[in-house]
Image: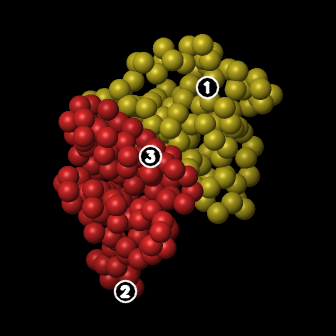
Amino acid sequence: MKKYLFVMRHMPHNGSHVQETLDMILTTAAFDQQVCVLFVDDGVLQLKDRQNPAAMTLKDTASIFRALEIYDVKTLIVEIESLQARGIEASDLILPVQTIQRSEISALMRQYDVLIPD
Amino acid sequence: MKYAVQVNAGPYTSNAGLDAYRFIRAALQAGHQVSRVFFYKDGIYHALRHAMPPDDEIQFTRDWSGLAERHQIDLVVCISAAQRRGLLCADEAKRQGKSDDDVAAGFRIAGLGQWLEATLLADRCIVFG
């Protein structure tokens, strides 16, 4: 077993990257590996509430994020500075998350065997 | 050291695929192993059999096929990413009632399980793009 850290950095609903990275996350979890998802920079917007993706071409990724718990993906971590820079509170997010400061991120990354960026 | 490599960007979107190719050649030269390259997202465009760049430009697909043949590297194209973008192997095309055969020599189509297996067996995983 390995520990996987997925790092989400980009806006949602702009191309297919969130959905395709979510497919990797679900596959990794389905094979019983330990998974954590870290949201930094514009990636924090992937968890913003009140998205209306119906007119977008791909799936509603918010509902996939909500389903992660079923796959035992319970560790979602959001960088505080990225939230603040975008005027978002943790209460504006669709899921309960842990928050972390930028200065703590390299120590977090060292705890994982595999790092996959979105 | 055993490496698993993932390529996420198309050949004409960024240099990520070229960087991956050069990294792999350098790693092999230095005595490391690269067992599998997983082409995901727009990276699947590296596998197009019928890509025909002008003669005086880099031949991405041909270079990957050559690398795979010389060093027995498994070039895996993600099936869901490929289907979304219209890249079909002959078998899959037949199943869909189509007559495509788009996958270049040395590449094969498979699922994300092959990516996960590569990351589990490797000492290091590197993502390009």
The disc at residue B39 is none
In this orientation, does residue A29 appear?
no
Q: Could you tell me which chain the residue with mark 2 belongs to?
A: B
Label 1: element kind: strand
Q: Nearer the viewer, residue B86 or B95?
A: B86
Chain B's shade in the image? red
Residue type, numbered disc 2: Ser
Residue furthest to the right: A87
x then y, percent, for residue B7: 43, 50
The disc at residue B19 is 3
Q: Residues within 10 Å of mark 1 (few under 14, many from 20)?
A: many
Residue type, numbered disc 3: Asp
Q: Residues within 10 Å of mark 3 (few under 14, many from 20)?
A: some
x then y, percent, for residue A15: 62, 55
Left or right of B95, for residue A84: right
Residue under the point 20% across and 36% down? B31
Compare marks 2 and 3 and give the one earlier in the sequence.
3
Is A45 drawn above or below residue A1 in the view shown? below
x then y, percent, for residue A10: 63, 41
Q: Whole-Å distance between the Cαs marked 2 and 3?
A: 33 Å
Instruction: Identify the residue under disc 2.
Output: B99
Q: Could you tell me which chain the residue with mark 3 belongs to?
A: B
Q: Nearer the viewer, residue B88 or A34?
A: B88
Q: Whole-Å distance between the Cαs marked 3 and 1?
A: 30 Å
Residue under the point 39% across and 38% down? B126
Do dots 2 and 1 share one subunit? no
Q: Say which of marks 3 and 1 sits in front.
A: 3
Say which quarter of the image contains residue A72: top left
Label 2: element kind: loop
The disc at residue A78 is 1
Residue type, numbered disc 1: Val
Label 3: element kind: helix
